[in-house]
Image (cartoon, rainbow, N blue to C red):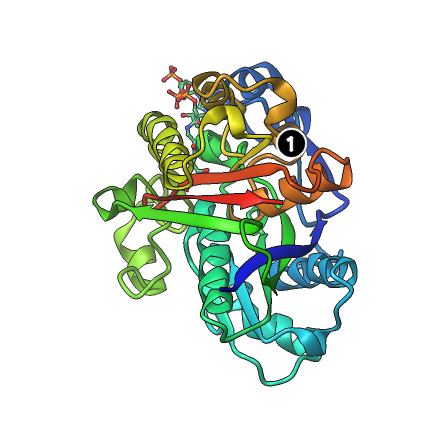
């Protein structure tokens, strides 16, 4: 019986720091509102000319993860790339990573599951490893939000939250029973697809149509979020899917050593922390520094927690995410 373990982790964020005060210079917002509602102090934005893109940041994170896994690109048999902000409409980021890292003609697959993209991606990787099809899978979550946000007062309810960055994990076959990824749990509810969405440009809203049909104040090529509705669903689904994962493994909240929640909003993470009666050092948060980096948020947080020695051999690590789709999921890992 094969299981998959995380054999290497890496992350990358652009150098350019954008503080809440910086944002208040271009839109009607302020540091107090942003910190009070979200916990965010600053985020990173790609700067024109700094050489970054969604797939380039993914490559930077992936190189670190591969080195830590003590593997080379030739060892990787599948690339899974999770993003909502690909460099191009098509093809996806996976093949761009493959090209930039000079990899063989291995399969590259993109996952479009927004905030829960990384959890979905490691679940897919885990299935391929469990069946014996592949030994080493490279999983990347990367986002370039700043390239597509409405940086005026009209977009302030969304734009202050999101940031750029990438994280990567190498998943490797293991035969050690009871270790590695114990289980993953995935859900979606398409009835709420439009509550957190970016409609166009798309095949439903192509560019000429957008320009002719939409007045300036209703532009569908910026993200839309029904913040309070998303918040209320998030706190319920986070708790449900963590419980589902614990129960599937006959575990309880007291067994959790480290919870890495998708960094949606510090208030959401704190709510979940209280529900599971976890201490501050059992929940890793870095939204204060990076904002919400959707598919990149869990691998960046996981990498940092591991680098800081907060995850040790044998620890029970729980990943959980909720976001646009709605989609949500959890992964229960024995490190
Ligand atoms: O990662 C995927 C999932 N995403 C989430 O989980 C996000 C979930 N939602 C949230 O985190 C919160 O709903 C937000 C942080 C996005 C917003 O907080 P809120 O407490 O729900 O605020 P609100 O949208 O109800 O807005 C309250 C007020 C409004 O003004 P009025 O109508 O009361 O006069 C907004 O216009 O705050 C105003 N506002 C702002 N003010 C200053 C909205 N954005 C801003 C802003 N700066 N950036």
Asked if residue 77 is positioned above or below residue 125 in the image, the reply reads below
Q: Residues within 10 Å of mark 1 (few under 14, many from 20)?
A: many
**Residue 161, relative to residue 280: is it above or below?**
below
The reply to whether residue 310 is visible in this rendering is yes
Query: Left or right: where does residue 261 sit relative to residue 43?
Result: left
- Find residue 215 and report its horizontal and vertical position in percent: 31, 45
Q: Quadrant of the C terminus?
A: top right
SS for dot 1: loop
Instruction: Tell me residue 150's x, y (percent).
Output: 49, 41
Q: Image check: 12 left or right of 118? A: right
Query: What residue is shown at x 40% (from left), y 39% (from top)?
Result: 245
State the residue at coordinates (61%, 31%). Answer: 287
Seen from the viewer's position, the closer of residues 207 and 237 is 237
Question: What residue sits right under mark 1 in the picture?
Answer: 286
Q: Is residue 24 visible?
A: no
For residue 57, above or below residue 288? below
Give the quarter of the image for residue 323. Answer: top left
Picture residue at 58% right of the left edge, 22% below the top: 39
Q: Residue furthest left?
A: 191
């Amino acid at each position: 019986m094969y299981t998959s373990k995380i054999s290497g982790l890496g992350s990358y964020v652009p150098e350019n720091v954008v503080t809440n005060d910086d944002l208040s210079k271009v839109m009607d917002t302020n540091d107090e509102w942003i910190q009070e509602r979200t916990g965010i102090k600053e985020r990173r934005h790609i700067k024109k000319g700094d050489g970054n893109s969604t797939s380039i940041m993914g490559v930077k994170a992936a190189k670190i993860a591969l080195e830590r896994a003590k593997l080379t690109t030739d060892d990787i048999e599948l690339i899974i790339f999770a993003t909502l902000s690909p460099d191009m409409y098509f093809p996806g980021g996976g093949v761009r990573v493959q090209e930039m890292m000079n990899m063989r003609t291995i399969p590259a697959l993109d996952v479009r599951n927004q905030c829960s993209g990384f959890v979905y991606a490691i679940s897919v990787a885990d299935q391929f490893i469990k069946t014996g099809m592949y030994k080493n899978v490279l999983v990347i979550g990367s986002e370039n939000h700043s390239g597509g946000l409405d940086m005026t007062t009209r977009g302030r309810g969304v734009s202050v939250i999101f940031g750029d960055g990438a994280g990567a994990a190498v998943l490797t076959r293991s035969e050690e029973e009871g270790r590695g990824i114990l289980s993953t749990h995935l859900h979606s509810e398409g009835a709420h697809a439009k509550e957190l969405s970016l409609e166009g440009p798309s095949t439903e809203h192509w560019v000429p149509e957008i320009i002719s049909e939409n007045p300036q104040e209703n532009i569908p090529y910026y993200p839309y979020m029904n913040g309070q509705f998303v918040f209320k669903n998030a706190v319920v689904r986070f708790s449900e899917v963590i419980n589902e994962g614990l129960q599937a493994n006959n575990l309880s909240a007291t067994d959790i050593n480290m919870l890495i929640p998708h960094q949606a909003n510090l208030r959401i993470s704190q709510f979940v922390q209280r529900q599971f009666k976890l201490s501050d050092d059992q929940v890793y948060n870095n939204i204060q520094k990076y904002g919400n980096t959707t598919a990149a948020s869990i691998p960046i947080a996981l990498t940092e927690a591991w680098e800081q020695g907060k995850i040790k051999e044998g620890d029970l690590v729980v990943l959980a995410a909720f976001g646009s789709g709605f989609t949500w999921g959890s992964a229960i890992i024995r490190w």
